[in-house]
Amino acid sequence: MAQISNSSDSLYNFVVRDGNGIKGLVDSGLSDVPKIYIQPINNRINKLNSKPCEIQPIDLSKLNGPEHEKVVDEIVRAAETLGFFQVVNHCVPPELLESLKDSAHSFFNLPPEEKVIYRNSASNTRYKTSFVPELEKVLEWKDYINMVYSCDEDALQHWPNICKEVAFEYLKLSSNIARDLLKILIDKLGVKLDESKMESLIGMKMVNMNYYPACPNPELTAGTVRHSDSGTITILLQDGIGGLHVKSEDGSNDEKEVLSNGKYKSAEHRVLTTSTQSRVSVPMFSLPMLTERIGPFPELVKKDGFAGYRDVLWKDYMDNYFRSSHDGKNRIKRLFIGKTPIHRLERLFKG
């Protein structure tokens, strides 16, 4: 068993620079949460102020039947209010989802030396802890591996052998769900997009495997602090333990809020830790291509009479997203709203 000094520098080096992650720290025999993981009170989750989600799961198998419009209305209503919803009877087989959770546990249970090779990988695969620990005053109770999809060959060559095949299949199938949901939401806005434009909005894809080890003092920590997702649509697989907390009064993803001129909200959410057992989640992110400029759809600006957001090059947004710590929805406010005047209509209608 490793013996680790209680100094902040020593813990940081062990967890971050040496690539052991919070999993390595817990495996070393941790009995109390170190100071660098104790969240300020405003970032802690008060269970007394939380309640179960009241939105019923949405049955996607009914989309092509007589209840099509009812299901469409359920999806739109959830996107306009909470910004999160659960789908059932989709195209991803239950056995694949179980294999995906098992493979996530298998990856994080690998010896540290087998995981750390992905810490500074030259490929589109990164093993990380917290979010951007170099910039965070308090670290998140989470390790994760980020697998960016560029093409089939690259994914199967560079993603970790222990999870690549199941993660690749999950990405392909969940991408179909993301495309179907986005098409429904855009159609309901009265906006018509051709296939090339649709692809430009969801053409970049990433799969994360998140690992939240059991925590001795979960009330002091956060698996993930307050944030809203980047991108267009996120398809999230949780295990049976759960832990996702959504801020209901805000309520989806930053880019969808901007494209819809505020009609579909981007809700803050965070993740609770637990003392009972380690848990995993696997999000699949569909994002715009880096060369895409993102702003409200011109049809909505014309109908609404105003643009609630300025347009931003998506690469600039992503550079900012991964170079600053989680800060609720401040990124979207800072980059898409900022202090600049609202767009004039003629600028939005160019090209």
Image (tube, grey):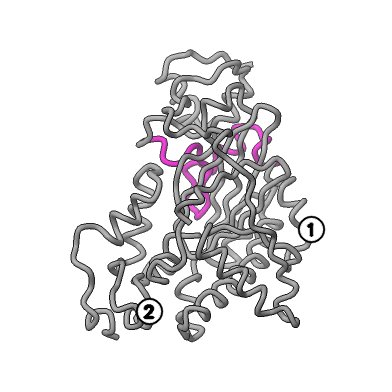
The residue beneath circle 1 is 94
Q: Quadrant of the C terminus?
A: bottom left
Is residue 288 toward the left or the right of residue 62 in the image? left
Residue 187 vertical position relative to residue 136 in the rendered view, above or below? below
Question: Does the stretch in magenta take in 140?
Answer: no
Segment tinted magenta in the rendering: 106-134
The residue sitting at 74% across, 55% down in the picture is 97
Question: Does the stretch in magenta take in 109?
Answer: yes
Mark number displayed over residue 213: none
Q: Residues within 10 Å of mark 1 (few under 14, many from 20)?
A: few
The residue beneath circle 2 is 300
Across and down, in percent, residue 9 comes to 40, 20
The residue sitting at 38% across, 44% down in the picture is 327
Q: Nearer the viewer, mark 2 or mark 1?
A: 2
Provide the secondary structure element on which disc 1 rests. helix
> Looking at the rendering, which quadrant does residue 62 occupy?
bottom right
Q: Quadrant of the N terminus?
A: top right
Labels 2 and 1: the sequence-earlier one? 1
Across and down, in percent, residue 350 comes to 26, 84
Q: CA distance from mark 2 to mark 1?
A: 38 Å
Provide the secondary structure element on which disc 2 rests. helix
Across and down, in percent, residue 234 comes to 55, 60
Q: Are marks 2 and 1 in contact (CB under 8 Å)?
A: no
The residue sitting at 55% across, 26% down in the picture is 219
Between 85 and 199, the residue placed more toward the observer is 85
Q: Look at label 1 and name its amino acid.
A: Pro
The residue sitting at 44% across, 34% down in the picture is 43
Is residue 335 toward the left or the right of residue 283 in the image? left
Q: How many marks?
A: 2
